[in-house]
Amino acid sequence: MARTHSTRNVVVIGAGPGGLAASILLAKAGVKVTVLERLPRVGGRTSTMAVNGFKFDTGPTFFHYPRILSEILASAGYDIHRELKLVELDPQYRLVFGQGGEMLAMPDVRRVEQAIAKLCPADAQHVRRYLADTRRKLTAFEPFLAQAFSGWRDLAKPDMARLLPILKPWKSLDEELKTYFSDPRVRIGFSFQSKYLGMSPFQCPSLFTILSFLEYEYGVYHPVGGCGAVTTAMARVARELGVDIRLNEPVESLSFRGRRLTGVRTARGDYRPDSMVINADFARAMQRLVPDELRPNWSDRKIAGKRMSCSTFMLYLGVRGVYDKVSHHTIYISKDYPRNVEEIGEKHVLSADPPFYVQNACVTDSTLAPAGMSTIYVLVPVTHRHPNVDWSKERDRYRALALKKLAQIGIEDIESRIVFEKVVTPDDWDHEFELHQGSTFGLAHIWSQMLHLRPRNRFDELEGVYLVGGSTHPGSGLPVIFESARISARLLLEDAGIPLNWNTPAAARDFAEMIPGAA
């Protein structure tokens, strides 16, 4: 139920992609917006780490489905192609299978079929059927992803009920893909994207076949300067619209009158906003800033009982030379992938043969390193913080294992070439980035934690508080986080009685036109 109150002054906690997108939309509508960011830079996990001439994306490195951000910028009168330089990747990424074989993901169907035929000729015949079926699924479900879910009644609507045969909530992602592909390597090639959500394809809902579809339908891009350049550009746009972004200013406490937000305190002073948007990690923000008794549905006890996504072990390496025969994105799938995902998500132990991802971005973007050098970004999915793993003891061992395994994708003799190195463990994600349990993807995307069962965009527990980010509806991943910002900004403005003055999204360029053979 909408709550009407005067809103001309909004505080946004966190300058991550969701907070920046919400700020742009609110400022365009005439709202005074102040963003309070704990770190000395914008972007949160989607930021740039710059050191000794090297520039690394801190978190996300895949930039796909730019349409939503394009629409948000167009709503405020900006053109994404003027704000960012986007390079379409071809190949989009390379998959290396521990079971044997490789697969290059291509931006057109014919070449995708040829790549899959090298692994399993029979499966190549079903690629177009998979794409056609998933295109229908996305078309049917996309309007629901773009709206708020305020309760179970939203699920009972006839239009939603008609989606059930398409969404097949009783199936996992892998089970759904078995109706198209018999080779487990091919299925992994269309389901490893569940790791964008911190999930296993054997547990992730079948809805998320849309993730790989989006890559093949709309392409995978590299923003020159890295994904941190995206949030830098968004912050520039926000400031031009009048948003006051204050860095190095963590929020210390919130004050309430009953359930109504009345104030925000930092070390620099007190703020009295009409409304607030929280872009900080949901679980951590609730536990630190909101008294337990004010959030009965999301109390500390209930948060402790929620399922969190996995974490990541990271290596950020500045090296001499460029590995010019290694793809921009490479994913290594270990021989016993089902065992790996069980070790990560169920047993909470470290794998001896872990899957991993490597970004070798300098083959595309020379601006990321000094001349004659390059950046190597290594991500190993691991359990979130758990008593089974002591990272003070495992850190160096796992570093050595990760470096050794890079040879399996063609990155050899790397240790002798390292001139800069930073290691990040789940403990660091917890302490440095304030992520609950070091979970880099927030609440897991299982059916019992989706739609109205996620923290809602208009946060029901409190008055005047709205949520954006990966742990609220619709979920994780940059395009989805941008959508959460659009939903929450719209709700806030509607509740305040402020008319939307966003330009029609038709002003945004349709990226589908850029992909030959996508139809």
Image (cartoon, grey):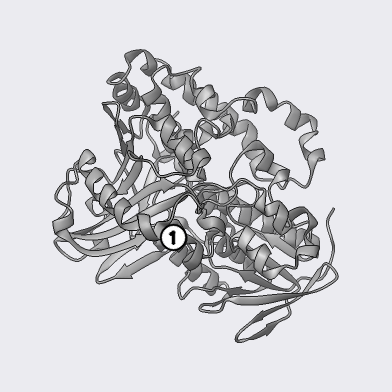
Q: Up-down: is 337 above or below 175?
A: below
| Amino acid at pointer 1 | Val
**In terms of image quadrants, where is residue 519?**
top left
Q: Nearer the viewer, residue 378 or 3?
A: 378
Q: How many badges with numbers are in the image?
A: 1
- Residue 256: percent from the left, percent from the top? 79, 73
Left or right: 297 with respect to 416?
right
Residue at horizontal 45 percent and vertical 32 percent from the top: 191
Residue found at the very far top of the displayed protein = 122
Left or right: 212 with respect to 472?
left
Q: Up-down: is 483 above or below 133?
A: below
Q: Nearer the viewer, residue 221 or 290?
A: 290
Residue found at the very far bottom of the displayed protein = 268
Q: Nearer the viewer, residue 227 or 101?
A: 101
Residue at horizontal 19 percent and vertical 66 percent from the top: 370
Left or right: 441 with respect to 64?
right
- Residue 511: percent from the left, percent from the top? 45, 43
Q: Up-down: is 129 above or below 12?
A: above
Regarding residue 504, the answer to whether it shows in the image is no
- Residue 324: percent from the left, percent from the top? 17, 47
The residue under label 1 is: 230
Helix, strand or loop at label 1? It is: helix
- Residue 447: percent from the left, percent from the top? 65, 36
Residue at horizontal 48 percent and vertical 58 percent from the top: 79
Regarding residue 388, the answer to whether it shows in the image is yes
- Circle 1 residues within 10 Å: few <14, some 14–19, many ≥20: many
